């Protein structure tokens, strides 16, 4: 079942690459991966908009949540129950912000598998031989080091990706820091999770930089998916949250 699914997806990528070949020539398959990523993000975009609406609703509820935290400061379980009941009353899902990222994961893993497997559907995986500016889409950073390092033909592709990821991560870092400064997470000072919440608050702005590790490890095709999706996320969130400061902060996920 899975074998035929991956074979069908490989065929789809090949057909898209054939359509793009007149424009992108030898990099048509890489362009097909980027186009596929954009299509996935367009499909998930309505959920991202719904998430933004939910985040704005949570911002309006922040004063009431603060009152509940203060009222039930000595009883964390009761406090959590009261907050959940308030969210349910206002029809706000606490997991809403995770859905766009979760729904993208299958597309990422399919791309990862497709460009990590020597055989697809019982046949040799011809996609592994496709390249982006001379760098195999099935190759990884460690392979590029054996062909001239980061300044070589293959390494230069990764160097460009790293620059893009670093720029997006820096943008997300500054934006998340500003959001947290303007709307700090209400402290559950008397609760057992206060220390963990404080640590998460410090780490959250740095999460975007974790994408550099992902790009360093996965096949180049999957790295293209991650870089395209991460860049889309940064632009999308800047647009959707342009007129509000979320309660807490919307962490920049790798996808």
Image (spheres, rainbow, N blue to C red):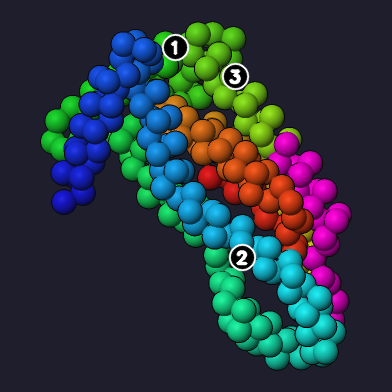
Q: How packed is label 1: few (under 14 Cα within 10 Å), some, or many (20 or more)?
A: some
Residue at the location (76% across, 44% down)?
Answer: 175
Mark pair 3, 2: CA separation:
37 Å
At label 3, counting other C-alpha atoms closer than 10 Å, the crowd grade (few under 14, some 14-19, many 20 or more) is some
Q: Nearer the viewer, residue 244 or 14?
A: 244
Of marks 3 and 2, the one in the foreground: 2
N-term-proximal mark, 3 vs 2: 2
Image height of 30 relative to 203, above or below: above
For residue 88, above or below residue 97: below
Disc 1, SS = loop
Looking at the picture, how far across and down is residue 11, in whole percent?
20, 32
- Chain part drawn in magenta: 171-190
Horizontal side of 243 relative to 165 (left or right) equals right
- Per the rendering, the mark at residue 133 is 1
Spatial distance from mark 2 to mark 1, Cα to Cα?
Answer: 42 Å
Q: Is residue 126 visible?
A: yes
Q: How many marks?
A: 3
Q: List x then y, in percent, for residue 132.
A: 42, 16
- In the rendered image, the vertical position of residue 190 relative to residue 232, given as above or below: below
- Secondary structure predominantly adopted by residues drawn in magenta: helix
**Residue 24 covered by magenta stretch:** no
- Asked whether the residues under the numbered discs 3 and 1 touch, taking CB atoms below 8 Å apart as contact, a structural biologist would say no
Q: Is residue 54 left or right of residue 2?
A: right
Q: Residues within 10 Å of mark 2 (few under 14, many from 20)?
A: many
The picture quadrant where one finds residue 68 is bottom right
Secondary structure beneath dot 3 equals: helix
Residue under circle 2? 54
Please identify the residue farthest to the left as the structure is shown: 122
């Amino acid at each position: 079942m899975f074998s035929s699914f991956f074979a069908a997806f490989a065929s789809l990528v090949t057909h898209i690459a054939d359509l793009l070949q007149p424009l992108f020539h030898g990099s048509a398959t890489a362009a097909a991966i980027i186009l596929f990523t954009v299509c996935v993000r367009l499909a998930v975009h309505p959920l991202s908009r719904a998430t933004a609406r939910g985040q704005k609703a949570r911002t309006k509820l922040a004063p009431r949540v603060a009152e509940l935290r203060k009222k039930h400061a000595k009883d964390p379980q009761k406090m959590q129950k009261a907050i959940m009941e308030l969210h349910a009353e206002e029809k706000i899902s606490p997991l809403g912000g995770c859905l766009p990222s979760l729904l993208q994961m299958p597309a990422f893993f399919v791309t990862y598998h497709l460009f990590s497997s020597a055989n697809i559907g019982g046949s040799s995986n011809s996609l592994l031989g496709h390249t982006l500016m001379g760098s195999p889409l099935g190759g990884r950073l460690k392979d590029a080091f054996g062909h001239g390092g980061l300044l070589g033909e293959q390494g230069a592709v990764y160097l460009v990706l790293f620059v893009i990821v670093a720029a997006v991560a820096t943008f997300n870092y500054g934006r998340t820091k500003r959001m947290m400064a303007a709307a700090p997470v209400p402290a559950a000072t008397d609760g057992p999770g206060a220390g963990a919440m404080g640590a998460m608050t410090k780490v959250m702005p740095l999460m975007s930089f974790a994408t550099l590790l992902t790009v360093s490890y996965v096949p180049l095709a999957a790295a293209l998916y991650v870089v395209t999706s991460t860049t889309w996320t940064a632009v999308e969130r800047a647009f959707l949250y342009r007129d509000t400061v979320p309660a807490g902060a919307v962490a920049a996920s790798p996808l």
